[in-house]
Image (cartoon, rainbow, N blue to C red):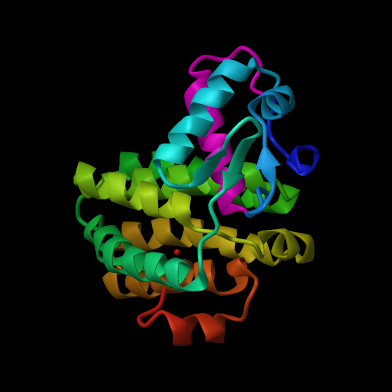
């Protein structure tokens, strides 16, 4: 239900439509927007503290992306993804993100890493504060900016799309137990490994990190995740 969504208030900040899209993406990934529920643009707009127009436009964009379905005269419904689809998305992410992140070693400058470190620290803070929407959004920003250092714009578009289609229904319980903080610290460790040029260590960490997506982050055991999706790794 709309009342249960922990959505941020956007106020009168610029690019409201893009902010709404990012927030809804995060709510979808975090599993806060549930399949079967119908969400109306006016109700969501009230939660955001903005007018209904940019929210309706954002929802229509999510329909184009295949993430939502339009329900005539009612609103929008989350498109449900099967476990097979989610496993396939995770496998593709492994194939794309692991080698591409490792490629950043050798291209990232000390200034690049200095710019990303506060972002990694913010992810840790949000895990501690149990702010799942902010956690997902800043996790997305961190990984896309890290991957951007590899210099492939087409890759960024593909990874952003795949991340938006993931579903992490287990995040809430992990945040409550404090286990999400350990995953958050992996972002700090990634930057350390890039800085020291440890390609093998970074590859192993990325496989573990992406593996959370179909393991504990999805609300199931990591061992089950590793059996269902082939090569492992967020």
Q: Would you say residue 41 is visible in this rendering? A: yes
Residue shown at 71% from the left, 20% from the top = 49
Residue shown at 38% from the left, 70% from the top = 88
Identity of the residue furthest to the top in this view = 12
The kind of secondary structure the magenta stretch mainly shows is helix
Magenta stretch holds residue 103: no
Q: How many marks?
A: 0
Q: In which quadrant of the rendered view does residue 75 lie?
A: top right
| For residue 199, above or below residue 221 | above
Q: Residue 182, position in %: x, y?
A: 62, 65
Range of the magenta residues? 10-30
Front residue (pair 52, 26):
52
Look at the image and tell me in which quarter the C terminus lies. Answer: bottom left
Q: Residue 68, position in %: x, y?
A: 52, 44
Q: Is residue 144 left or right of residue 6?
A: left
Identity of the residue furthest to the front in this view = 72
Q: Residue 9, position in %: x, y?
A: 69, 25
Residue shown at 33% from the left, 59% from the top = 194
Look at the image and tell me in which quarter the N terminus lies. Answer: top right
Q: Is residue 231 left or right of residue 172?
A: left
């Amino acid at each position: 239900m709309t009342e249960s969504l922990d959505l941020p208030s956007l106020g009168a900040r610029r690019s409201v439509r893009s902010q709404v899209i990012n927030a809804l993406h995060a709510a979808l990934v975090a599993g806060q927007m549930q399949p079967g529920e119908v969400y109306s643009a006016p109700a969501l707009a009230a939660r955001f503290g903005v007018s209904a127009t940019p929210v309706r436009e954002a929802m229509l964009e999510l329909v184009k992306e295949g993430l939502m379905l339009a329900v005539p005269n009612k609103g929008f419904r989350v498109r449900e993804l099967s476990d097979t689809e989610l496993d396939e998305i995770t496998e593709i992410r492994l194939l794309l993100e692991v080698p591409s992140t490792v490629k950043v070693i050798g291209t990232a400058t000390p200034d690049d890493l200095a710019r990303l470190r506060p972002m990694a620290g913010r992810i840790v803070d949000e895990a501690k504060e149990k702010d799942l929407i902010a956690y997902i959004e800043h996790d997305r920003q961190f990984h896309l900016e890290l991957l951007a250092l590899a210099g492939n714009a087409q890759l960024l578009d593909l990874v952003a799309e795949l991340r938006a289609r993931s579903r992490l229904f287990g995040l809430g319980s992990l945040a409550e137990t404090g286990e999400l903080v350990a995953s958050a610290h992996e972002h700090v460790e990634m930057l350390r490994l890039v800085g020291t040029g440890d390609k093998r260590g970074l590859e192993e960490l990325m496989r573990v990190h992406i593996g959370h997506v179909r393991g504990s982050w999805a609300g199931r055991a990591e061992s089950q995740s590793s059996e269902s999706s082939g090569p492992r790794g967020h």
